[in-house]
Image (spheres, grey):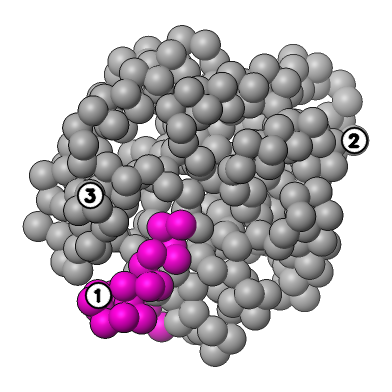
Amino acid sequence: MLQRPVPWPGGAKVACAITLDMDADSLVHIHHGPGAANKLSATSMLRYGPEVAVPRILDTYRRFGLKQSFFIPAWCIENHPKAVEAVVADGHEVGYHGYIHEAPNSLSREQEHEWMGRSIEIIERHTGQRPRGNRSPLYHMSAHTPALLAAEGFVYDTSLMGDEVPYFLDTDAGSLVELPVSWATDDWPPYVHAPDLNYMFQVLPPERAMEVFLAEFEALRAAPGGVWIGVWHPFVSGRLSRWQRVEAMIEHMLDTGDVWFATLEEIARHVQAVTDDGSYTPRRDRLPYSEGDQVPPALAGKA
């Protein structure tokens, strides 16, 4: 069912990671600039993440013995240091997620590299080590991002959606393991209703959202060798009723005996290891996928 299934540690059928993008109030600032100070309701909703949800999430991870990956904009690291200190103290991974949730594909190559460098320095100063993984804000990876990440020594990216199994991104500056994600396991569509952020979806009950998340998980159990990655946000999935359902989901996943819960760095390094020892042959994508305008002039604007 899967092309190139990965042999996971201990014979696990699925590698699982519940990743948390702690965007906090960076979102209201990047959307509204100086007007953010006048958006108190939106700010309070977003600050719920580091102030209320992160302690709840960390408590769950401690009880289940899980180490997971958090992706935190550098601005949030500086403005919510206690939450970040707690994440690091519990041994979780902190990955790169922009400076203030800016879209990399809206920047020039030079701007993207400059803010990446500033953010790496902030992450290293607050966590004690350079980030090993990247998730581009809102998945807005630019044509330059993979090579910049490779040049900065990153191990993996988790912004693309090209498979159910990890694959490699090859650039002139080096290679990255791509740990693919999907909107089907992102908590934004079922839960986010935020007029001040220009997102107005129908809010679904946790059982409906979990139906979609677990459908992806069960499909991977039936076709072993893939990776299931939850792309969730503390201010969204960390709300009480939703997180209670997440705890039940974790218990179910563990009870199957078919999963390997790990940080994304651990998953990426395992893929590197089985590739290096010859026991696995991954798919490799050479980047960029295309250059220049591929549309004939007569068809321009005819979408």
Residue at left 23%, top 76%? 279
- Dot 2 crowding, Cα within 10 Å, few <14, some 14–19, many 20+: few
- Please report whichever mark, 2 or 1, sits nearer to the chain's N-terminal start: 2
Q: Is residue 301 visible?
A: no
> Vertical placement of 258 versus 234: above or below?
below
* Span highlighted in magenta in the image: 266-288
**Which quadrant holds the C terminus?**
bottom left
Q: Which residue is mark 3?
A: 12
Using the image, tell me which numbered label, if any, was put on residue 88: none
In percent of the image, x 40 and y 72: which residue is there? 272
Camera-side residue: 286 or 277?
Answer: 277
Q: Is residue 59 a member of the stretch shown in magenta?
A: no
Q: Quadrant of residue 9?
A: bottom left
Residue sticking out furthest to the bottom: 172
Local secondary structure at mark 2: helix
Which residue is at a point 50% across and 29% down the rendered structure image?
61
Q: Which residue is mark 1?
A: 280
Residue positioned 56% across, 22% down in the render: 59
Q: Is residue 279 left or right of residue 42?
A: left
Circle nearer the N terminus (3, 2): 3
**Tag 1: amino acid:** Tyr
- The residue tagged 2 is 34
Decide which of 5, 108 is in the foreground and name it: 5
Tag 1 secondary structure = loop
In percent of width and height, residue 198 lies at 61, 31
**Residue 250 visible to an observer of this rendering:** yes
- In-image side of 61 versus 79 (left or right): left
Asked which secondary structure carries label 3, the reply is loop
In the displayed structure, 120 sits above or below 153; it is: above
* Figure quadrant of residue 122: bottom right
Labels 1 and 3: the sequence-earlier one: 3
